[in-house]
Image (tube, rainbow, N blue to C red):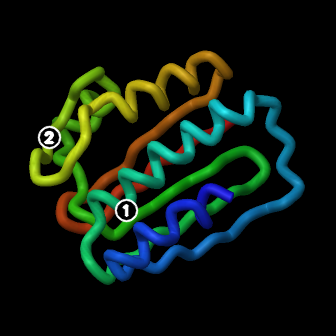
Amino acid sequence: QRVEYFSILATIKKISIQTDLNNNVNLTIDKKKISKLIDNILSNAIKYNKVSGSIRIVLDTNSLSIEDTGRGIKKENIDLMFDRYARFDKSVGGFGIGLNIVKMICEEYNLTINIESTLNKSTKVSISW
């Protein structure tokens, strides 16, 4: 549902979205909160991606990962990404609260969030349980 919701934005930037979704995953979490978590990560993957880039979404038994082919994040900024109002790229809109919300949802449900990034190449956000 969330991929479908964001497909129009992705299409505008000519971003392809590939999914590898295991339909047998059982995670007990409020539907609105998991939607907000996915929306924030997917929105960032589109917003900070390059034109004609791609996004790969993988859902397996113990994790969800969203990886883009965008701008990447400087290593020294990765740990600061979850701070409220943290913004390191002012060229696109936003208030810097999305990943802070994601982190709070992860903490509430004992989920682990990890960001791996290579500057000017890609960013991968993984949520595991």
Q: Are marks 1 and 2 in contact (CB under 8 Å)?
A: no
Badge 2 marks a residue whose secondary structure is loop
- The residue under the point 41% across, 53% down is 43
Give whichever of 7, 67 is nearer the camera.
Answer: 7
Q: Which amino acid type is marked by label 1?
A: Ile
Q: Residue at x 51, y 62 (%)?
A: 6
Q: Is residue 8 above or below residue 85?
A: below
Q: What x and y, as percent, mark residue 128?
A: 63, 39
Q: Residue furthest top?
A: 108
Residue in view at x 79 percent, y 50 percent: 61
> What residue is shown with label 1?
46
> What x and y, as percent, mark residue 12?
35, 76
Give the Cα separation between the discs numbered 1 and 2. Answer: 16 Å
Q: Looking at numbered disc 2 in the image, what kind of residue is underneath it?
A: Phe
Q: Which mark is residue 88?
A: 2
Residue occupying image coordinates x 67% and y 21%: 109
Observer-side mark, 1 or 2, equals 1
